[in-house]
Amino acid sequence: MEQIAENLHFYRYEFKYFLEGERLARITKVLDNHLSRDKHCGETGDYPIRSVYFDSPDMRWFHEKRNGLEKRFKYRLRAYSHVQSGFTSPLYLELKGRDGSLVIKHRVRLPAEEFSQGLGGGAGWLRDLLYRTSLDNGVAERFIAQSFRYRLFPSVITDYNRAAWEDHTNPDFRATIDTSSIAWRTSWKGLPLGIPVPLLRGGGIVEIKFRYRIPFWFQRLVREMELTRISFSKFQRAVEAVYLSDNGTRLNRLIERRIACLR
């Protein structure tokens, strides 16, 4: 995964569908017929993704998502492995936002060798590293300022496997299927804690990403399969699963967030 293309800025629309069983197998076959698998898909046809989301002590960005704010954003670390003890290259800090239906994403690449044990000193350590290495980057600059303003810290982790397709004749269009999605509590170092919780029991999230148009063949597929768009946020589902599902998880959050906020 070391040679992932350095596309650092995205402006696009994202449509999601939940499918399982034969319907998921059918759409996978159609995507294979019309598109090419992303070059980073391994022998299994997919690759691992980990997202470490940041939030404030009052869960500001979780509540913005849950309440459906038209304009919102969040920060996350994006890695391409499920290593338990740290992060591997490539590693990015991402600012992902939404303006109505338009999804906006900007990211800055991080020196993964500095993260072999996670965030060495928590969010404050990450701020210092960004100040030393990426101060001329807009994402880094904004994270530094807002991490002070909102007291940001690692909030929750999602792991999943992604199969991805691209169209070499129409780079504007991309399709993905995410499966085996799980959520973790996270330490102040941004590393997994406790026992993972499944976010989807069977099936997968099919997502198309485009800036200008959806290919005719996919529009036809939507009609034939009667696909219905859904709203699905891994971040929201993960927080609900590991911190808000019962009194025990709520207590975990109170204790662990208090420790994280001291960093």
Image (cartoon, grey):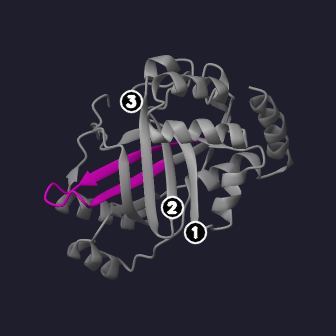
Q: How far apart in space, not on screen, are marks 2 and 3 (Cα)? A: 24 Å
Q: Up-down: is 258 above or below 106?
A: above
Q: Residue 142, image x and y in percent?
A: 55, 42
Element type where label 1 sits in the image: loop
Q: Secondary structure at mark 3?
A: loop
Amino acid beneath label 3: Pro
Q: Which residues are magenta?
A: 154-180
Cα–Cα span, label 3 and label 1:
31 Å
Nearest to the eye among marks 2 and 3: give it: 2
In the rendered structure, the answer to whether residue 112 lies left or right of residue 59 reads left
Q: What residue did someone put label 3 on?
A: 90
Residue at 66% in and 20% down: 121
Q: What residue would you read off at disc 2? A: 98
- Asked if labels 3 and 2 touch by Cβ distance under 8 angstroms, the answer is no
Q: Nearer the viewer, residue 242 or 125?
A: 125
Residue 163 lies in magenta, yes or no?
yes
Q: Earlier in the sequence, mark 3 or mark 1?
A: 1
Tell me the kind of residue under disc 2: Arg
At x 37% / y 65%, what residue is drawn? 22
